[in-house]
Amino acid sequence: MKNYLQLCRFVFIVMAVLIVSCQKDGSIIENPPIEDSIEAGSVIATLIQRAAIEDRSFDDFIDLADCLSINLPLTITVNDISITINDENDYNDVLALLANFNNKYDLEIVFPIVITLNDYTQIVINAEEELIPYVIACQEQDEDIPCIKFVFPISFSIYNIAFELIDTLVINSNEELYLFIENIQAGTLVSLNYPVLMELQNGEIIEANNNIELQEAIEAAALDCDIVEQTDFTCFNKLDYVLEVCIDAYSEAAFFDLSSIISSCDTDNEFTISYHYTEQDAITNQNAIPNPEEYTLASPFKDNTIYILVSATSNPGDFIIYELILIVFNCNDEICNEESLNIYLSECKWATNGSIPFVLDFNNGQITATLNENEQTGQYTTGTQIIISSGQEFTQYTINGFTGDFVVLNTTYEVGFCSEEYIAVHAINPEDSIAFTGMERDCDTGCDNPGIITNDLIIYIPFGEEAVELISGEQLNDEAITYTEDRAGNPNCAAAFTANGALIPITVTEENSLVTADAFSVSIWFQMANEDAGNLETFFQKGTTLNDGFSIGAYDLNTPLCFSENPPFSIWDNDWNQEVDVTWTNTDWHHLVITKTSNYYVQLWRDGILRNSQEGLDIGLEALTTYNLGNNLIGNLDDLRVYKRVLNPNEINALYELEADCFTCL
C-alpha cells in the first residue's frame, strides 16, 4: 500500500508539472537542442517506454503470460496443497515443489487477485474467466525490450513551447519512467539530462550522451534481444519424464531407450541432448551416457534416475535439466506374493510338468517328493525380491536336501504366476536349467469342487439341490424356497423365493461373524422376477430387521444396492437403469459383489464391472445371531459367497466368469 501511495503521488506531481508547463508565463529561458527534445509519441519516447517495461515472466509458470504479473501476496493450490507466496524468494520454493511432482501437478490460482500489466495498470481479477483474455492478449504483444535497462536515477528538464524551463524531474524506477513518458502533453518539450547510463543483458554498462546515441543503443539492444531470445523449451516441459519396462525374472537386466522420452520434440539443429548419471554431471556436461538408446539397468534397479541435459545449440548456456525416472515392473499379469504362495503350496500336493514326474507335498518348511512310488524328504523356504523403483516383487522358493534321483529338485525357483490350480516357475538365472517349469494342483479329496478362491471364505452356499452352508456344514431351513434352474440351465441348482414372508436364516458363528471394523466381500448371483417397482427386496442381510447391521438387495426398478439404517448409508448401482437390457421386468442373471474395507470404504461391482464406490458403511459393533437370505424377495439366488477380506478386481472377475455348478462339497 505504501508503494502504491508513493506511485500515485509521483503521477500527480508529473501531471501537475506537465500541465503547468503549458500555463506558466515563464521563468528561465533556455533553448534545448532540438535534436535532444522528447515529444509525446516520438520514436525516442516510444523506445524509452519499451525499455522501461519490467520483465514479468518470472511468474509465467503460474499465470502463463509474460506481459503481466500477479501482485503478492498470492495464494495457489498445487495438487490440493495450499501455498501462499509472500515475496519473490518464495517462487523458488514453489518451483522445487513442482519438480518433486515430476511435472504431474494441478496448479490453481485462488481468486480474487490483482494483476499488473506492462503499462503498470493494476486490475482486480475475480475469476479465471476474467484472467484468460489478458493471457491471450499477452501472446499477441511484443512491446518490451528486456535486453537493456536504464541505470537510475536519471532526470528530465521540462520546457514549454516558449523554451522556458519549468522544472527538473528525477526518475528513480522503470515504473516512474514509463508513466512520465506516458503523460507527456502535446506542446510540452522534454529533454533527458545527459549523460545517462544503461545496462545491457550481459551486464555491460554503456553511456549515451544525446538522443541519437540513446536511440541507437536501444535499437541495437532490441536486435540483440531478437538474436538471443530465450530458447523455447515448451515441448520438453510438457513431457512426462517416466519410462517403464517389465522383466520376466528378477535377475534379468532392464533395457531402456532413453532417447524415446523426447522423440516427440523436434531437436534438429536447435537443441543438443545428453544423458547423465548425476545432476552435477548434467550441469557441467560431463560423463554423458554413451549409448542412451540401449541403456541397461541391473537388479535391484535402484539407480533409476537419469538427468537429461537439454541445451540450445546456438547458446549452450541456455539449458534445462530434466529428471527421468526409470521404473521396472514384473511382466507377469498377476504377481504372486509370498503369503499367497505359502497358502497354495500347503493346501494340496503338486504335480510337476518336467520330464521327471514328481509329486511334491509342501508342509511348513518340509517337502516330501514322490517319484515312481519312491519318496524322499527335503526342505524348502520362500522369499521375496523387491524391485526398488516400482515396489513390485518377485517371489521365489528354494528346495534343498534331496539326493540321488531327487537331487535335480535342489535349486531356487522364481514364481512367475500362482493360483489355486497352477504355479509357473523359472530359474533365478535364465541360463540355468531346472527340473520343471510348472506345477498343477493334485488334490484327491473325493469332492469335485475345485475350490476356486477359497481364502478367507466364511460363508458358501452353492444351492446344489440343497441349502447347506459348506464352510460350517450347517443344514439350512429351506422351507421358504423351491429349487430352480441356475444361470447355466442346471436343474434344481438355484433357490427361488416368492416373498411369502419366510427367510433362510444362517447362524452367526465366531468364524463367520462380521462387525464394524471387519473387511468383507459378499458375492451372489441374482435373477429378479418382481414387477412391482416399489418393492424393497433383500438378498443377504445381517440381522432380521433393517435397523440391524446391513442389507444387500434391490429396490426402485430392481436396482441393486447395499444399505444400512443405523447409521443411514446407501450405495446404488448407478448404471442399472441406463443399460438397454436392464428394466424392472428384467429376467437376466446378474453377478453382484459388495466389498467393504476396514476403513468403511464400499465398492459395488455388477457383472465384473465396478459400478459405484462410497465411504461410510458401519455394519454395527454386535455380531448378532443370524444372517438372512431372501427377505421379501421375488426372484432367484445362487452361489452365495461371503469373505472376511476385500476381493481384488481379478478375483471378482474370476467369480463372474466362473461357470455355474451344483456343488454340494468343498
Image: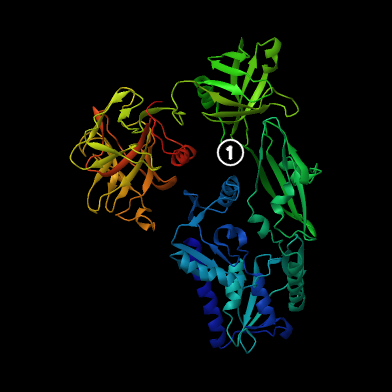
Determine which quarter of the picture holds residue 315: bottom right
In the image, residue 595 sits, relative to residue 555, either above or below, namely above
Looking at the image, residue 257 sits to the left or right of residue 169; the answer is right
SS assignment at label 1: loop
Q: x and y percent of residue 565 in the render?
A: 23, 41
Q: In this orientation, which residue lies closer to the viewer: 72 or 83?
A: 83
Q: In this orientation, which residue lies closer to the viewer: 448 or 334?
A: 448
Instruction: Look at the image and name its color scheme.
Output: rainbow
Determine which quarter of the picture holds residue 142: bottom right
Q: Which residue is disc 1 drawn over? A: 333
Residue name at image x 44 percent, y 35 percent: 647
Residue name at image x 73 percent, y 46 percent: 257
Determine which quarter of the picture holds residue 597: top left
Looking at the image, residue 476 sits to the left or right of residue 264; the answer is left
Q: Residue 208: tell me if it is visible.
A: no
Residue lying furthest left: 501
